[in-house]
Image (cartoon, helix red, strand yellow):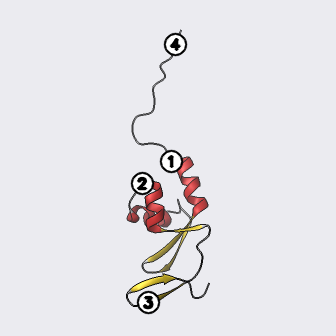
Amino acid sequence: MTNLFYRHGSAIVYDVALDGYLLVKDAARELGISDQQVRQLIRRARLVGEQLTPRLYLVERASIEAYKRERRSAGRPPVSRRAER
């Protein structure tokens, strides 16, 4: 993977399409968590991602979808309203 991005002044310009991948900030927004939590999930192998530079991570979109499916909502589990007989 060469020429992934280049600097234009102080801005970083991406030189490739990121099909199938998201930046950490976009993954965090989609999951409703912080950027730091996304990086922790990558380090813990809960999300599939790769660190390209000290500050640039890419996260596989498929791993985000899988994580959203397996993630439980926080709090107490739902109580069945059905009376046992």
Q: Which residue is mark 3?
A: 8
- Tag 4: residue type? Glu
Other-residue count near label 2 (Cα within 10 Å), few / some / many at <14 / 14–19 / ≥20 = few
How far apart marks 2 and 4 lie (CA) works out to 37 Å
Image disc number at residue 32: 2
Estimate the x, y position of residue 69 in percent, counting from the top left.
Answer: 56, 48
Marks 2 and 4, the one that precedes in the sequence: 2
Quarter holding the N terminus?
bottom right
Image disc number at residue 39: none
- Tag 1: residue type? Arg
How far apart marks 2 and 1 lie (CA) works out to 12 Å
Estimate the x, y position of residue 75 in percent, counting from the top left.
Answer: 39, 38
* Residue sitting at x 50%, y 65%: 42
Report helix, strand or loop for mark 3. Answer: strand
Instruction: For marks 4 and 1, give the one nearer the viewer.
Output: 1
Report helix, strand or loop for mark 2. Answer: loop
Other-residue count near label 4 (Cα within 10 Å), few / some / many at <14 / 14–19 / ≥20 = few
Image disc number at residue 71: 1
Marks 2 and 1, the one that precedes in the sequence: 2
Marks 3 and 2, the one that precedes in the sequence: 3
Instruction: For marks 2 and 4, give the one nearer the viewer.
Output: 2
Other-residue count near label 3 (Cα within 10 Å), few / some / many at <14 / 14–19 / ≥20 = few
Report helix, strand or loop for mark 1. Answer: loop
Marks 1 and 3, the one that precedes in the sequence: 3
Marks 4 and 1, the one that precedes in the sequence: 1
Estimate the x, y position of residue 67 in percent, counting from the top left.
Answer: 54, 53
- Tag 3: residue type? His
Is residue 48 or residue 59 the one in the foreground? 59
